[in-house]
């Protein structure tokens, strides 16, 4: 099956936002074995959107348009589909009702503008949007199908999963090989080292293929194979994964959609252990990542973001001699923060960060990028010094990842019965 | 002048990499006043690249292709241009010489594969690439121009600046108008309401144009005008901004690259006031956003992420009767958290959130999405109840934005001398 993607939005053509939807849809379609040969971006211009849609519709089995379903005059996707399919736009009373409910639940008033979001070309199915006002559209026309999905990723992604994937899979039928992938996620190792360690398997790769992708303090090794049967693919991926684990197993913290914070959540839950955090330079990012995981309240007690020295003393009990002798950015302070958080919160594990995120605040002795990470548990405290110059955001992201990685290793050293 | 962009590369269509070149080129072309109406992505397939290039060449004054200039068989951009322009590929002796030098300097041997990188359609100019092996290509043909640039951003960006921008500016002549934009950032108002309030100006828009973009708990009103002189553009943007401020001024918290957290930082700094935060359902995101701003340590004392009730009592001093009578998600608890944080940290302002992020933990009485926001200062505490069902991430993002917005309004009510 061939699909073509169209992203609608002048802000995309002006480079004002990055088209993450295109990346998401491309990945997901590849995974279910749908070929994408062309992707287009057009602005909020009816004539040009109609032109591109007509061309895509002529070539592909399925066309997926993202964006342009909002309530404003700029939002022209509905009209474009109606024009290409030569069908009138019809307002759906059920969709109007859903809009009313959506607004009522939020205590807002439905404006006339929003009513156009309940319109679709005659014969189209409206796709439920639990996370926003714009329903999606599915129109079967001349043996092909056009989908229109809302632009916000938080609305598009659940709708794609719930409405588009099952439809396309059924339509593609049982024929057809599809792509199976598995990603191994590594921390505490750089992309070039991974490339060097895997140079032989990478040079010899035929099936599965091996590719590397780097993001802050994380490397993804992606294995991919095509197969008609899941079992055959799984066997090949298992064999390749085993070979890579032999070489790099100690760095692998998760697979596929895992995140370091979700992995830590699972480990803590298995051990019925609790966690407290004391953050200085990461400024709340570690706590925010941990609480991105649903159910985090089962093991996460809380965090103190102690930007001022006062707070470090009062809430975390860091001795004033430590601050005056070694300073707030010191291994001694990190240690005291972790111990203090563990005691104050009554937690099994505590994690602490203190460092210089920059751009200001650095000195020759303590440069921007310097950071101390501490993990405390019943056996004591472990502190490490690291140095990661970069932008403030890069620094926060990398330090949070490294801190969580140290915590993960510390938890793994703890027997499940011990806590 | 109209340009069309083509990104070549199967890895783009598979969603394995994000097309940052497209974003870069779109931004830069907009800045120099070149219109981009279409952008395309195609894989490493000669027939399909030729098809897209032909279409783009028919419509645009300039076509810019990125990628496909490497030394492998997958790299087909040279052939595609040659085919569309019906010219043979010629190998340039000077380009071969440059390749030899490039490899020699790095102690590597020039392979036969690489020689194809010295080829271009007859009559084309080769563009110098100081940062890689692939020269760019510029071909003037039938009164239009085709550029081919290498895919790696570190090679593409300097080449675009040095070779493409001056050429396009000269070709556009002295009329050379460019685009000037200004964005007004609004909070506490939905996109559809903004659209309704601005329906007259939007309907009447000619110059500057007005467009709306929504993101979680924020609407951006973007004004754009073309002018040869900056002064003329500024006058027009000023006038349009003034008209919109008359209608929606109370909702505008910033312009252009402002963020709510940066605006709050400026307000606090002006007043030499300090801030403390007590977060439950936002889980550290508010602190993390505040500390994304360089220099935040000047006014931000810290945050307590109090996920457990214990912490709310011990660190923030929330009375156990409040928790037992009203529960942790209540206006009484939000109020006590804000007051407690202000007292514990000795801060001028304190912000507190407590709510149910979901997906679990909701009840009929207190559904997922319910949240209480409190702002405390010397004059007292202000609490509001809101309801924002959605994904966990949407919820955290929206609530953090609304909480910061309440804080901003509260700070603005405070005279600069008062604190």
Image: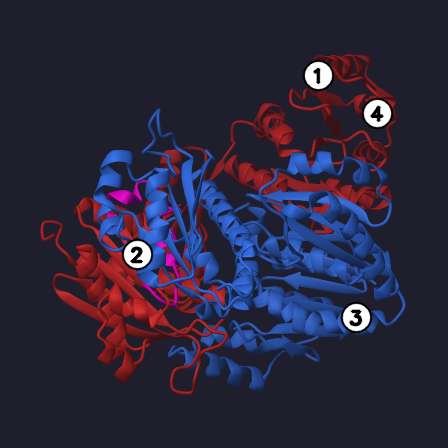
Chain colours: A blue, B red
Q: For the residues tagged 3 and 4, is the chain the same?
A: no
**Label annotation for residue B219:** none
Q: Tag 2's secondary structure?
A: strand
- Which residue occupies 57% across, 62% down? A153
Q: Is residue A254 left or right of residue B76?
A: left
Gap in angstroms between the C-alphas marked 4 and 2: 59 Å
Gap in angstroms between the C-alphas marked 1 and 2: 51 Å
Tell me where residue A158 sits by quadrant. Answer: bottom right
- Quadrant (top left, top right, bottom left, bottom right) of the N terminus of chain A: bottom right
| Label 2 Cα crowd, 10 Å radius (few <14 / some 14-19 / many 20+) | many
| Label 1 Cα crowd, 10 Å radius (few <14 / some 14-19 / many 20+) | few
| Label 4 Cα crowd, 10 Å radius (few <14 / some 14-19 / many 20+) | many
Q: For the residues tagged 4 and 1, is the chain the same?
A: yes
4 or 1: mark nearer the eye:
1
A366 in the magenta segment: no
Q: Which residue is mark 3?
A: A169
| Label 3 Cα crowd, 10 Å radius (few <14 / some 14-19 / many 20+) | some
**Label annotation for residue B106:** 1
Residue B95 screen position, x and y as percent = 77, 16
Q: Which residue is mark 2?
A: B303
Q: Which residue is mark 4?
A: B116
Q: Is residue B65 left or right of residue A417?
A: right
- Which residue occupies 47% across, 67% down? A296
4 or 2: mark nearer the eye:
2
- Which residue occupies 52% across, 34% down? B32
């Amino acid at each position: 099956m061939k699909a073509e993607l169209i992203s609608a939005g002048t802000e995309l053509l002006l480079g004002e936002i990055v088209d993450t939807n295109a990346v998401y849809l491309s990945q997901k379609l590849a995974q279910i074995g749908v070929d994408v040969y062309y992707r287009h971006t057009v602005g909020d211009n009816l004539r040009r959107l109609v032109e591109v849609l007509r061309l895509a519709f002529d070539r592909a089995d399925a066309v997926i348009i993202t964006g342009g379903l909002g309530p404003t005059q700029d939002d022209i996707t509905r009209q474009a589909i109606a024009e290409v399919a030569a069908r009138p736009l019809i307002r759906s009373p059920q969709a109007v009702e859903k809009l009313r409910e959506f607004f009522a639940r939020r205590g807002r008033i439905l404006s006339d503008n929003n009513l156009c979001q309940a319109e679709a070309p005659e014969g189209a199915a409206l796709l439920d949007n639990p996370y926003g006002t714009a329903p999606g559209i599915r129109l079967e026309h001349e043996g092909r199908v056009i989908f229109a999905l809302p632009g916000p990723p938080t609305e598009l992604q659940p709708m794609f999963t719930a409405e588009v994937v099952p439809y396309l899979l059924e339509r593609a039928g049982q024929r057809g090989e599809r792509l199976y992938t598995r990603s191994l996620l590594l921390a505490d190792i750089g992309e070039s080292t991974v490339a060097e360690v895997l140079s032989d398997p990478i040079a010899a790769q035929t099936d599965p293929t091996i590719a590397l992708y780097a993001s802050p303090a994380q490397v993804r090794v992606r294995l991919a194979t095509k197969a008609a049967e899941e079992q055959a693919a799984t066997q090949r991926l298992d064999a390749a994964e085993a070979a890579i684990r032999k070489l790099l197993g100690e760095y692998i913290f998760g697979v596929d959609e895992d995140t370091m914070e979700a992995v830590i959540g699972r480990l803590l839950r298995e051990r019925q252990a609790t966690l407290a955090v004391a953050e200085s330079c990461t400024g709340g990012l570690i706590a925010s990542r941990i609480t991105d995981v649903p159910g985090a309240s089962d093991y996460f007690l809380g965090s103190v973001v102690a930007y001022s020295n006062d707070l470090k003393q009062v809430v975390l009990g860091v001795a004033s001699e430590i601050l005056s002798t070694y300073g707030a950015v010191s291994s001694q302070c990190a240690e005291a923060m972790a111990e203090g958080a563990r005691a104050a919160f009554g937690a099994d594990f505590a994690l602490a960060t203190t460092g210089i995120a920059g751009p200001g605040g650095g000195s020759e002795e303590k440069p921007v990028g310097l950071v101390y990470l501490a993990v405390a548990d019943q056996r004591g405290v472990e502190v490490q010094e690291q140095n990661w110059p970069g932008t403030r955001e890069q620094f926060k992201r990398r330090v949070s990842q490294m801190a969580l990685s140290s915590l993960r290793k510390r938890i793994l050293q703890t027997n499940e019965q011990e806590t």
